[in-house]
Amino acid sequence: MPMNIAIDGPVGAGKSSIADLVAERLHILHLDTGAMYRAVALDVLRSGIDPRDGEAVAGVCEEADVRVRYENGAQRTLLGDEDVTGLIRTKEVSAAASHVSKWPAVRRRMVRAQRELAKTADMLIDGRDIGTNVLVDAPVKIYLTATPEERARRRYMQQMEKGDTTPYEQVLSALNERDSQDMNRETDPLRQAEDAVLVDSTRMTPEQVVDAIVAIVEEVYGK
């Protein structure tokens, strides 16, 4: 059986970057499920569909050819044969993905794909319902979080480095709104799995977070 590690947590917790570092340390693959939902969102926007129209989104998702491949251990996300890895990180796509990802038809299709991928290789998968829905039997489950204020501060600093001058208060408000959406959606809401280990990174460096997660994995798998 392949090694399966599930990492869940709210927006801005650093799941993707931490998961990259942990996967690199353990020499396994990292599947960023958020990128898959973003790819569907991009397809929805290109189709001129309102991301809040669940029926129309379901129709687009059914036809969307979302694929994942790895180059030098790094995930590339594709729509058909088009590499959209760099196109799915815009604010517009992010906003659309927050709506697209709540629709049951989209989640069912993405979860099926994620489970199949997890069977193919040692893999760390991060998202918002991995331990509670996608990999319910994963031997290692992590719930990575930090206070809303700290998550907003990190996101604010990242945006400042890119020249985005959105005020901190606005960043925090948007983050709290996304938390509410993720935790209160009807299908697969964000929550900590009962058997997940809580890692609160509020006062931790990225290196300390990686060390903590690797230690948990090594304790379970004996690596």
Image: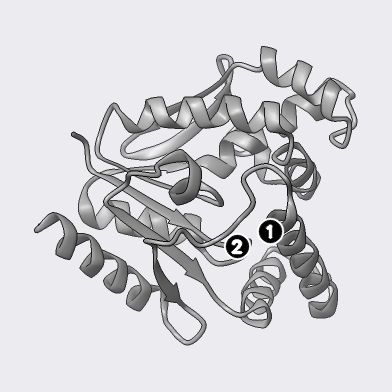
Q: Position of residue 72 (x, y in %)?
A: 31, 37
Residue sitting nearer the eye, 193 or 51:
193
For disc 2, the marked residue is 10
Above or below — where is 171 with respect to 188? below
* Residue 221 in view, yes or no: yes
Q: Residues within 10 Å of mark 1 (few under 14, many from 20)?
A: some
- Residue at the image position 85 percent from the left and 21 percent from the top: 56
Amino acid type of disc 1? Met
Q: Position of residue 92 (x, y in %)?
A: 81, 44
What's the residue at 41%, 80% (across, down)?
205
Q: Mark 1 or 2, which is nearer the eye?
A: 1
Contact flag, marks 1 and 2 (Cβ < 8 Å): yes
Residue 9 image point, x, y percent:
54, 61
Of helix, strand and loop, which one carries label 2? Answer: loop
Quarter of the rendering containing residue 164 = bottom right
* Residue that appears at 68% across and 59% down: 183
Q: Which is nearer the N-term, disc 1 or disc 2?
A: 2
Q: Is residue 126 visible to the viewer in this orientation of the structure?
A: no
- Residue designated by label 1: 183
Residue 114 vertical position relative to residue 157 in the rendered view, above or below: above
